[in-house]
């Protein structure tokens, strides 16, 4: 199905949903066990000189490297068992997003203000500021045709919208540099579904079907934002519930 067909199909679904008084199909995205992780890699997770607030997992691989990273959450091997189920659930969510119909096609995201919906986006490197305006129940999904890349790219939530209700589903890998990204990254491609972040921040989750590499990046996972407990007990890596935490560790 091409993007035009997806757009027309989504319009019909949305109209039917509104007439019937129910939410459109794309309003619900389930990550299953993957929702418990801030960082999840299939082959490896490498963190250097960064800060992660939330659980870190690797499955079915086992390579975990921490060089000067502060992790406020559970890490391998404590998370190994949970990561296996989380990886399966993450891939299921990715496939569901990949088959979702788009409500609009976009070329570039800079200086846009978008309502909740499912957007098809090209792979041109992202820059500037994207504003997402909607209620706390609003869901934004960005299906990227290719890799998601960006430098000095920022996402701003407005109108009560929540970062953890934003989903990025590229068909290739993710490379973000000195960017302030918000949302759940689902890099589910089996061949090159990796996530590489240098500098900047992520509010949400980084889920990859290959590896995750963080260098000087601050990550605040969704479980930390909602006050949920971690997937495994690790007394040396904990965070306090219902505490607002900045990407680099200070309370706000």
Image (tube, rainbow, N blue to C red):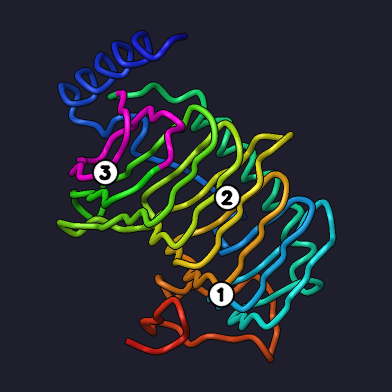
The front one of 99 and 219 is 219
Q: Quadrant of residue 18?
A: top left
Give the extent of the magenta segment. 105-125
Judge whether 37 appears above or below 48 on screen: above
Q: Which residue is mark 2?
A: 32
Q: Nearer the viewer, mark 1 or mark 3?
A: 3
Who comes first in sequence, dot 1 or dot 3? 1
Q: Is residue 171 left or right of residue 86?
A: left
List the residue tagged with mark 1.
52
Determine the CA span between mark 1 and mark 3: 27 Å
Q: Secondary structure at mark 1?
A: strand
Q: Closer to the camera: disc 2 or disc 1? A: 1
Label 2 vs label 1: CA separation?
A: 21 Å
User: What's the residue at 59%, 86% (across, down)?
Assistant: 238
The numbered disc on residue 103 is none
Task: Confirm or deny contact between disc 3 and disc 2 (CB under 8 A).
Answer: no
Q: Position of residue 129 (x, y in %)?
A: 26, 52
Quote the CA–CA distance across marks 3 and 2. 31 Å
Q: Residues within 10 Å of mark 3 (few under 14, many from 20)?
A: some
Instruction: Compare marks 3 and 2 and give the one earlier in the sequence.
Output: 2
Dot in front, 3 or 2 = 3
In the foreground, 131 or 188: 131
Taking the spot 43% from the left edge, 10% from the top edge, the residue there is 2
Find residue 26 and report its horizontal and vertical position in percent.
Answer: 36, 33
Give how far across and how far down residue 138 sits, in percent.
26, 46
In the picture of the structure, the residue carrying the numbered disc 3 is 110
């Amino acid at each position: 199905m091409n993007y035009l067909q997806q757009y027309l199909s989504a319009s019909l679904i949305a109209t039917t949903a509104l007439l019937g008084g129910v939410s459109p199909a794309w309003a619900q995205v389930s990550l299953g066990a993957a929702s418990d992780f801030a960082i999840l890699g299939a082959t490896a997770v490498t963190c250097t000189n960064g800060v992660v607030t939330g659980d870190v997992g690797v499955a079915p691989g086992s390579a975990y490297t921490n060089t000067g990273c502060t992790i406020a959450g559970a890490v391998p091997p404590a998370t190994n068992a949970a990561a296996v189920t989380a990886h399966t659930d993450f891939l299921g969510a990715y496939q569901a997003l990949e088959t979702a119909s788009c409500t609009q096609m976009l070329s570039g995201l800079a200086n846009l203000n978008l309502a909740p919906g499912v957007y098809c986006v090209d792979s041109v490197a992202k820059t500037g500021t994207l504003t997402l305006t909607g209620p706390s129940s609003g869901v934004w999904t960005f299906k990227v045709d290719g890799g998601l890349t960006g430098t000095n790219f920022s996402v701003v939530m407005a109108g009560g919208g929540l970062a953890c209700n934003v989903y990025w589903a590229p068909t290739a890998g993710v490379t973000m540099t000195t960017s302030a990204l918000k949302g759940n990254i689902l890099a589910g491609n089996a061949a090159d579904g990796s996530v590489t972040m240098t500098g900047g921040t992520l509010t949400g989750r980084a889920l990859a079907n290959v590896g995750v590499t963080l260098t000087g990046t601050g990550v605040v996972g969704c479980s930390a934002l909602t006050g949920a407990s971690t997937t495994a007990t690790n007394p040396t890596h904990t965070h306090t519930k219902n505490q607002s935490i900045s990407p680099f560790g200070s309370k706000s």
